[in-house]
Image (cartoon, grey):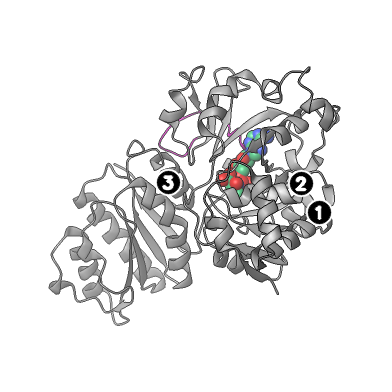
Amino acid sequence: MTQILPVHRLNQAPDHTSIAEWWASEKQKGTEEAAVVTKAAELLRSSDIPVGFPTETVYGLGADATRSAAVQGIYKAKKRPSDNPLIIHVDSLDMLSRLLNPTLTRDELANPNINSPRNQIPAIYEPLISRFWPGPLTVLLPNPKGSLLAKEVTAGLPTFGARMPSSAFARLLIHVTDRPLAAPSANASTKPSPTTAQHVYDDLNGRIDIILDGGPCGVGVESTVVDGLSDPPAVLRPGGVGIEEIRSCPGWENVKVGYHDGALQSKEAPRAPGMKYRHYSPKAQVVLFEASLDSSSIASRVKKQQLDIAMVSGKRKIGIVRTRTWPVALGLASDNIQKLTVHELPVTSLHDTIANINNETDSSPLIIYDVDLGPGADSIARGLFSALRRLDGLNVDVIYVEGIRDEEGDLAAAVMNRLRKASEVAVTV
Ligand code: TXA
Ligand code: MG
């Protein structure tokens, strides 16, 4: 059995200039949550079973990045393909610097006579790091000769991805463990990423010992992955930092979109190995309607598709994820309406269609579950994975999702990227 251990208070603590001082005072107070962190850090240092923990983006499944057996534990628990490398999480630039300079001792690194640790990070990253770290940005760095990182972390690539989370709790855990933590998202491979401890539990119960529960994640989608070692630099995965924000940094004006998700075309093979896999997928079929569609094409498409499903397999449960313009009434007050009585609702093409389907096909009632993620990209990002998981838990057969425009906000490209990957059917003009 996997234990869920609360760390809400520490996870909500205001950011601290010095994590070390914060930890010293927490330890002195001897709180229960401090004991949880101590225990988690001990497990991370000694056990080969990874630990679930909150970050600002999604929950991570952490292991000591310097120990092969511990890192292998991550792949095992998630059933993750071994050619998909992991992100390293650091609590400080010093920790990162040690990874880039494995032959230097701590004292040497701290010695003012050698270059400051900061200067040993490729210069192209300086503007990004000073603006977005700590935060949801992962940078690719050269993995040096004699690297301290377990080889499983990089899956054979000459680079490693690193980020410094803005979650002060995550940095505290890294600090107390005193190791860089390799941590992918804490979902079972192919499932939507977890944004609550319960999501981690649902996927990994029995496969890991503890999950640290800090409440729901603030960002809700994973970090943006950038490669500044290539020329021009590239975004390999859209995420918590917007592409336009990156483009506005010196040296990044020509940043390329190095991933493809159907909207932004690129002929190259994905360079972040993780981006080629089926991903973020609930059990239900996800049908994504791109934002460019008008309501009549949505209606005809839903009708055809829903009829097909109903005719062929008698599937009768639908989930709807609304974001912006699909009418409120489509989502009914409660999320468990049997036998939708459509005429009581303001008429829209989409519901007309659903009403028709209900009449045309037989007997078993059509059940619709509605989720409104709210209009802004930020709130959509925060609720997206949770909505997909929730609908899956209700055993819907199909989830219709209203897309947003990629340009609609810093997080919109990340939201649409996850949806395009989750959907088996994408409906475009
Ligand atoms: O927000 C996040 O980044 C979360 C939290 C837990 O920090 N972590 C996360 O990790 O999303 P994961 O493993 O689910 O996704 C890592 C992505 C994958 O697409 C992987 O292929 C890519 O980063 N990646 C990691 N190292 C890489 C490398 N050396 N070269 C290219 N891509 C890399
Ligand atoms: Mg992941």
**Disc 2 versus disc 3: nearer the observer:** 2
* Residue 133 visible (yes or no): yes
Q: Residues within 10 Å of mark 2 (few under 14, many from 20)?
A: some
Which quadrant of the figure contains the C terminus? top left
Which residue matches tag 2? 178
What residue is at 54 percent from the left and 18 percent from the top?
Answer: 232
Residues shaded magenta: 260-274
Frontmost residue, 425 versus 45: 45
The residue carrying pointer 3 sits among few (fewer than 14), some (14 to 19) or many (20 or more) residues within 10 Å by Cα, namely: many
Instruction: Classify 77 as above or below 92.
Output: below
The residue indicated by pointer 1 is 45
Local secondary structure at mark 3: helix
The label number, if any, that marks residue 415 in the structure image:
3
Q: Position of residue 239 (x, y in %)?
A: 49, 41
Q: What type is the residue that disc 1 sits on?
A: Arg
Would the CB of label 1 be found within 8 Å of ligand 1?
A: no
Picture layout, residue 141 above or below residue 76: above
Asked if residue 26 is among those painted magenta in the image, a careful observer would answer no
The amino acid at mark 3 is Val
Locate the N terminus and report the quarter of the image it occupies.
bottom right
Precedes in sequence: disc 1 or disc 2: 1
Marks 2 and 1: in contact by CB < 8 Å? Answer: yes
Identify the residue at image location x=74%, y=60%: 38
Looking at marks 1 and 3 on the same chain, the residue that comes earlier in the sequence is marked by 1
**What is the quadrant of residue 156 in the picture?**
top right
Q: Nearer the viewer, mark 1 or mark 2?
A: 2
Is the residue marked 3 within 8 Å of ligand 1, measured from its CB? no
Kind of residue at badge 2:
Asp
Residue 276's disc is none
User: For residue 263, what is the image quadrant?
Assistant: top left
Nearer to me, 290 or 7:
7
Tell me the SS state at disc 2: loop
